[in-house]
Image (cartoon, rainbow, N blue to C red):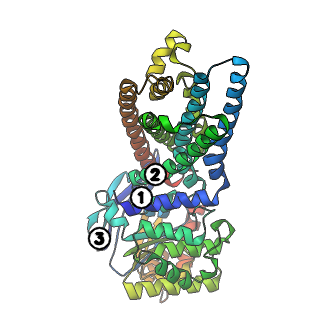
């Protein structure tokens, strides 16, 4: 892996952020809008004593963290779609650039985008809704890491599907994470799910991250178990996603799809 | 040999797109890869770039197997085709900057400026790709193709969208690159007089197979089966294309 090629991919996508209003919208508009809506909802809950402070903190914390996870997995797939839409794949892969260098460059740019989005949302949550994420940040960081890793695995998997089935399935870039949201226990505890779904929920790193987040906000402290379970599951999903993508990419090269994708 | 293609084939299901193709290029040579649409030229080029995995055969570039040395080989090669595009929201300068980084070009700013001047597109450097004409896009593609001073350059119809004056200028730049830096060029085009002027040797493909190889005059004599004193590749091309129509 060569750093100058990773840097080239980073520069390419940084230019895209500068030139493409859609990327600014993805990066800032949706996280900010989400937190505003959830913020008003927590105000509604707080008025008349419908719910306590802990619940409003759960909701706002969950909105910020879910926004990070969703944006990261979406941007991994959309970054690749940008190459497809501009018919740039042949140019890129006729250089010495490898797939792993491309993915690394995209990861770094997307981490920056996620940090900008989540940072803006956190600022609004603090300024408008009196939810300060900063004191909890050291305990949240391991869960955030797990969310990013799972987002990366899903992004790689989704990109593999796009390689296989072309832009006919590009909608997955925006919708795949949504499919997991009901069983990820983002805005409610695991105990709220019907019993058969709980097994499925425990198999998702997202569930462990959000359960861990709620424990921190409830004053229960950091849960190493939730972190390690999430990390272990991520290792499995990431290995599967990379194997799947590698196989699809080789198959695309063999079937000549790499030069025909659109 | 700078490039050696041995028994290269590509099969898609029942279709044999490239069938047992072999040829080689010496350092500093300009080789024309000709043939009607569907002859397998572009598929062959894509296999030489590692974008398509061959069903059989081997590609060796700079004495190395492409399958095992992709990174090392591609760092010293480049490619352009008017049918390939750049990210259209990025400016010319930004796009070329990305490729200069990918190839680790020394003094990228100077090299990009030199390329833009060479192909007469200096005034477009701050324009987004989306605002360029097809001819301007083609010239930006050529800037990209020469940015790393490649030892081997693959050009797929590089003058397809250019007017005769610009096409002439582009050919002079390519010939100068060959003369000054010893750049080896594999060239496909449907403009036969251009190929006659540019290429010292031709590989003529039809239905995925090499049907003739040699100098333009040798190709002319071999396919027209007549004694000629001048190359007539246009006639050769039409003879091959029409023989297919007649067979239909």
> In terms of secondary structure, where does tag 3 sit?
loop
The foreground one among A230 and B67 is A230
Label 1 with label 2: CB-CB less than 8 Å: yes
Mark 3 or 1, closer to the camera: 1
CA distance for labels 3 and 1: 26 Å
Q: Do labels 3 and 2 share a chain?
A: no
Against B40, is B106 above or below? below
Residue linked to disc 3: B62
Q: Residue at x 50, y 72 (%)?
A: B144
Q: How crowded is mark 1: few (under 14 residues within 10 Å), some or many (20 or more)?
A: many
Q: Do labels 1 and 2 share a chain?
A: yes
Against A168, is A259 above or below? below
Residue linked to disc 1: A6
Q: Are marks 3 and 1 on the same chain?
A: no
As drawn, the label of residue A108 is 2
Determine if residue B41 is in view.
yes
């Amino acid at each position: 892996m060569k750093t100058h090629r990773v840097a080239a991919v980073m520069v390419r996508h940084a230019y895209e952020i500068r030139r493409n209003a859609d990327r600014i919208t993805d990066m800032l508009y949706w996280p900010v809008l989400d937190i505003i809506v959830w913020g008003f909802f927590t105000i509604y809950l707080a008025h008349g004593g419908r719910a306590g402070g802990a619940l409003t903190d759960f909701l706002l914390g969950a909105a910020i963290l879910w926004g990070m996870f969703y944006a990261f997995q979406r941007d991994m797939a959309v970054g690749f779609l940008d190459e497809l839409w501009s018919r740039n794949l042949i140019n890129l892969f006729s250089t010495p650039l490898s797939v792993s260098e491309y993915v690394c460059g995209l990861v770094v740019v997307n981490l920056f985008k996620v940090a900008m989005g989540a940072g803006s949302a956190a600022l609004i949550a603090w300024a408008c809704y009196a939810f300060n994420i900063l004191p909890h940040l050291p305990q949240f960081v391991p869960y955030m890491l797990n969310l990013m890793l799972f987002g990366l695995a899903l992004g790689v998997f989704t990109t593999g599907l796009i390689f296989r089935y072309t832009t006919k399935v590009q909608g997955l870039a925006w919708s795949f994470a949504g499919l997991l949201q009901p069983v990820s226990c983002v805005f409610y505890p695991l105990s709220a799910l019907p019993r058969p779904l709980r097994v499925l929920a425990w198999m998702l790193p997202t569930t462990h991250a959000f359960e861990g987040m709620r424990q921190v906000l409830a004053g229960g402290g950091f849960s190493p178990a939730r972190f390690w379970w999430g990390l272990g599951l991520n290792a499995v999903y990431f290995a599967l996603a990379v194997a799947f993508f590698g196989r699809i990419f080789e198959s695309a090269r063999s079937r000549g799809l790499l030069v025909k994708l659109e | 040999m700078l490039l050696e293609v041995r028994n290269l084939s590509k099969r898609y299901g029942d279709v044999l797109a490239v069938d047992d193709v072999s040829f080689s290029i010496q350092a500093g040579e300009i080789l024309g890869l000709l043939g009607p649409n569907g002859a397998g030229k572009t598929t062959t080029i894509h296999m030489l770039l590692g974008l398509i995995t061959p069903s059989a055969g081997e590609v060796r570039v700079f004495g190395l197997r492409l399958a095992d040395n992709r990174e090392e080989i591609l760092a010293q090669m480049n490619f352009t085709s008017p049918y390939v595009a750049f990210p259209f929201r990025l400016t010319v300068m930004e796009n070329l900057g990305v490729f200069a980084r990918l190839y680790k070009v020394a003094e990228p700013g100077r090299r990009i400026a030199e390329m833009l001047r060479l192909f007469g597109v200096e005034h477009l450097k701050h324009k987004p790709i989306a605002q360029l004409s097809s001819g301007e896009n083609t010239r930006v593609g050529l800037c990209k193709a020469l940015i790393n001073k490649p030892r081997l350059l693959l050009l797929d119809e590089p003058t397809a969208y250019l007017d005769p004056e610009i096409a002439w200028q582009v050919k002079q730049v390519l010939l100068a690159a060959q003369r000054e830096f010893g750049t080896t060029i594999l060239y496909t085009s449907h403009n036969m007089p251009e190929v006659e002027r540019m290429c010292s040797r031709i590989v003529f493909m039809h239905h995925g197979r090499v049907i003739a190889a040699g100098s333009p005059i040798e190709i002319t004599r071999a396919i027209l089966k007549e004694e000629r004193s001048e190359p007539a590749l246009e006639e050769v091309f039409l003879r091959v294309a029409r023989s297919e129509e007649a067979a239909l």
